[in-house]
Amino acid sequence: MIIEWHSDNWTALALHFASLSMLGVGGAVTTLPEMHRYLVDQQKWLDDATFASSVALAQAAPGPNVLFVALMGWNVGLNASGGLQAGPWAWWVGVLTGLLALFSILLPSSAFTFWITQWAHHHRELRSVRAFKAGMSPMVIGLMVATGWLLQSAHDDFAHHWSLWAVTLVTAGIVWKTRTHLLWLLAAGALLGVLGWV
């Protein structure tokens, strides 16, 4: 997928990811629906398959959860410079765009979190601070449910993908009702994929 890219797109990408940084309560993964809307639906810099595979690959790789942002930036940069077949120049553009996306989503929230936690620690007995902490929990849960729904809806043909829907529902139930470590669930999902059952 080759896209038309202008120099002001770098700024637009950085500003959008910086604004998402401040919305990512519960982690950058909670901003996936908005990233999808912006990158796939509005700007058309990525297609659905590339978006979903970027998330899946980054989540399966060891390391921080936020790696999918760098992978999306890499794919946007790669698409803007002609794809993998365009050679080393395209790869460097992909790397630079990936770093731009990653730093744009990390720096604002990291700086704000550092400042606000210092302030909240000194004022932890205030009723407003306690109310804020209590009010954030439902918001984080809602953002996570929206993210899960978005990723699962890429397989909207229920008759063909019923096994993926079943795995999603069973996994959600296990997470909700037990204290099973998430790595066991990831391993089980990988095994089901290797066996060709999903």
Image (cartoon, rainbow, N blue to C red):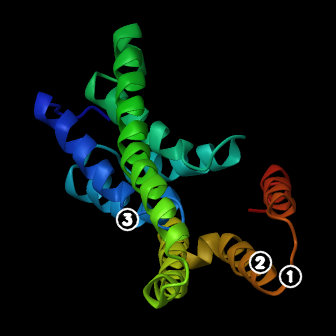
Q: Residue 31's x, y, as percent?
A: 42, 63
Q: Nearer the viewer, mark 3 or mark 1?
A: 3
SS under mark 2: helix
Q: Residue at x 17, y 31 (%)?
A: 5
Q: Residue at x 46, y 57 (%)?
A: 113
Q: Kindly report the distance in space between the C-alpha atoms of the residues bearing marks 3 and 1.
A: 29 Å
What is the three-letter code of the residue carrying label 2?
Val
Q: Is residue 114 above or below residue 142?
A: above
Q: Is residue 59 above or below residue 184?
A: above
SS under mark 3: loop
Quadrant showing the N terminus: top left
Q: Nearer the viewer, mark 3 or mark 2?
A: 3
Q: Is residue 43 left or right of residue 62?
A: left
Q: Quadrant of residue 99?
A: top left
SS under mark 1: loop
Q: Is residue 68 left or right of residue 60?
A: left
Q: Residue 17's x, y, as percent?
A: 32, 49
- Residue, disc 1: 178
Q: Quadrant of residue 46?
A: top left
Quadrant showing the C terminus: bottom right
Closest to the observer: 197 or 186? Answer: 186
Q: Residue 43's x, y, as percent?
A: 21, 50
Q: Quadrant of residue 164?
A: bottom right
What is the three-letter code of the residue carrying label 3?
Leu
- Residue, disc 3: 23
Q: Dot 1, crowdedness within 10 Å: few (<14), some or many (≥20)?
A: few
- Residue, disc 2: 175
